[in-house]
């Protein structure tokens, strides 16, 4: 319990749970009674501090109302699940609007201040009571600020993870270009995690599309370390277990060197110089022959 | 637990329902090789769709089945390996080398048809491996 460094400090001991609840109820009643003015005061302070600039005055007011009510409710019930859920919900809505973490933390602390000041004003005559009210208020208010801020940050992190996942998926598409023929064009750096993801997507793709031939094109990959190269070889073998032949195309000189260095058994892996050659080989394996339209003149 | 073996024309299909003990695997191998002889089968399909795990003994048994059935005149194909299982097996070095594999029962049957045709064991005209699709219609101006 924080001490106030006043002569009355000795009177400020650990409040019993019952009296804390009574005090909290009293203060919640006060906050509800003065809801309108306190909320306005808070909205004013938010604008003054130039927070939530991404939102309109109406939006700020609407959100402020919800936050205020949830805040007071959390104080009243002492439980924070509803607040947590609200914080996540709120974050989901305002993050796409470009609201930053410091703004969210800022406005919650401003509300804390506005409410604290209002308590100072009300109980200024009875210093002891004020101390006891603040003893009840502060831990709860801190917990609320914490809950809202953490909820916001967690939501941001969740969104970032989702976006990263989306980028990963985009960068390793599995494309069907003919019946039973899949192409996996890879561009960029393959780290072990991406390699694992690639393999998973490929094997599932083979099963879903019932592919018999897969062309993995690595023209866009400059180099890969021995671990990833091994992983590629294993992917080829695993594909075989699903009944599919893999043709790897577009190996750079560096990658060719890596494969030789790690001693890849070329009998286990079919490679062709470029993607065009790979597709032609794949079509051949599947029994296709591409025949150009004849050049003879057309009869009407 | 006995693995049910069905006869489908010239092929035998063994469907593994669940995890097999070493004894069950040995029994399956015995049974299949026996029936290949009895029915003069040309192909054996072992369907492991329902299997989560294939340990080294199971893989060796599958290879044995392929070799032994081969000696008695039948081609073997393993079907239904789950994608996750496939990768785990390869990582553990259990790659079923030398044993044919296919995605599922349908593919397995198509594979066996192709193999037995190539071996000239049916009277169907084998045709060439490369088939040209029908010529496209002439463009009209």
Image (cartoon, coloured by chain):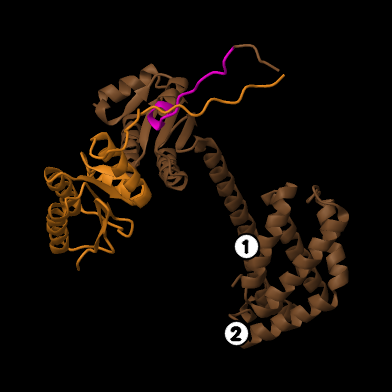
Q: Is residue A270 left or right of residue A133?
A: left
Place of residue A40 in the rendered image (x, y in percent of width and height, measured from the top left): 87, 64
Vertically, is A154 above or below A36? Answer: above
Query: Which quarter of the rendering shows the N terminus of chain A?
Result: bottom right
Q: Which residue is under mark 1? A: A146
* A5 relative position to A180: left or right: right
Q: Which region is colored magenta?
A: A283-295
State the residue at coordinates (43%, 31%): A216
* Vertical side of A2 occupied by B114: above or below: above
* Mark 1: secondary structure: helix
Which quarter of the rendering shows the C terminus of chain A?
top right
Q: Is residue A206 magenta?
A: no
Q: Using the image, name the chain to which the residue with label 1 belongs.
A: A
- Picture quarter containing residue A218? top left
Q: Are marks 1 and 2 in contact (CB under 8 Å)?
A: no
For the point 38% across and 29% down, the residue is: A285
Q: Write down which chain is painted brown.
A: A
Count of numbered labels shown in the rendering: 2
Q: Colour of chain B?
A: orange
């Amino acid at each position: 319990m924080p001490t106030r460094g006043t002569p009355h400090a000795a009177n400020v001991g650990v409040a019993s749970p019952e009296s804390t609840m009574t005090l909290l109820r009293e203060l919640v009643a006060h906050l509800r009674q003065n809801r309108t003015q306190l909320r306005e005061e808070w909205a004013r302070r938010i604008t003054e501090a130039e927070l939530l600039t991404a939102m309109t005055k109406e939006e700020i007011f609407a959100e402020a109302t919800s936050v205020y009510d949830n805040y007071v409710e959390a104080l009243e019930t002492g439980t924070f699940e509803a607040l947590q859920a609200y914080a996540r919900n709120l974050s989901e809505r305002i993050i796409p609007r470009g609201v930053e973490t410091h703004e969210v933390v800022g406005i919650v602390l401003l509300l804390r201040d506005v409410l604290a000041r209002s308590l100072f004003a009300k109980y200024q005559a009875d210093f002891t009571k004020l101390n006891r009210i603040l003893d009840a208020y502060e831990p709860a208010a801190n917990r609320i600020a914490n809950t809202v801020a953490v909820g916001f940050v967690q939501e941001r992190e969740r969104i970032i993870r989702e976006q990263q996942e989306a980028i990963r998926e985009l960068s390793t598409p599995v494309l069907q270009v003919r019946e039973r023929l899949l192409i996996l064009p890879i561009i960029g750096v393959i780290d072990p995690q991406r390699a694992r993801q690639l393999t998973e997507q490929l094997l599932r793709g083979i099963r879903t599309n019932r592919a018999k031939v897969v062309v993995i094109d690595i023209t866009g990959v400059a180099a890969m370390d021995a671990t990833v190269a091994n992983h590629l070889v294993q992917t080829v073998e695993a594909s075989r277990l699903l009944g599919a032949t893999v043709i790897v195309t577009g190996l750079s000189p560096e990658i060719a060197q890596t494969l030789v260095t790690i001693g890849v058994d070329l009998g286990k892996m079919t490679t062709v110089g470029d993607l065009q050659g790979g597709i032609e080989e794949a079509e051949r394996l599947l029994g296709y022959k591409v025949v150009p339209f004849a050049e003879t003149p057309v009869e009407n | 637990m006995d693995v049910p073996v069905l006869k489908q024309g010239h092929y035998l299909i063994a469907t593994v329902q669940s995890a097999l003990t070493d004894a069950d695997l040995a029994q399956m191998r015995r049974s299949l090789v026996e029936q290949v002889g009895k029915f003069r089968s040309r192909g054996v399909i072992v369907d492991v769709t329902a299997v989560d795990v294939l340990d080294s003994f199971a893989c060796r048994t599958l290879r044995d089945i392929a070799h032994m059935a081969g000696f008695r005149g039948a081609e073997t194909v393993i079907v239904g390996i789950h994608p996750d299982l496939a990768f785990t097996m390869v990582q553990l070095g259990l790659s079923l080398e030398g044993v044919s594999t296919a995605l599922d029962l349908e593919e397995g049957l198509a594979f066996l048809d192709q193999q037995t045709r190539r071996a000239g064991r049916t009277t169907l005209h084998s045709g060439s491996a490369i088939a040209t699709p029908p010529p496209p219609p002439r463009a009209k101006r």
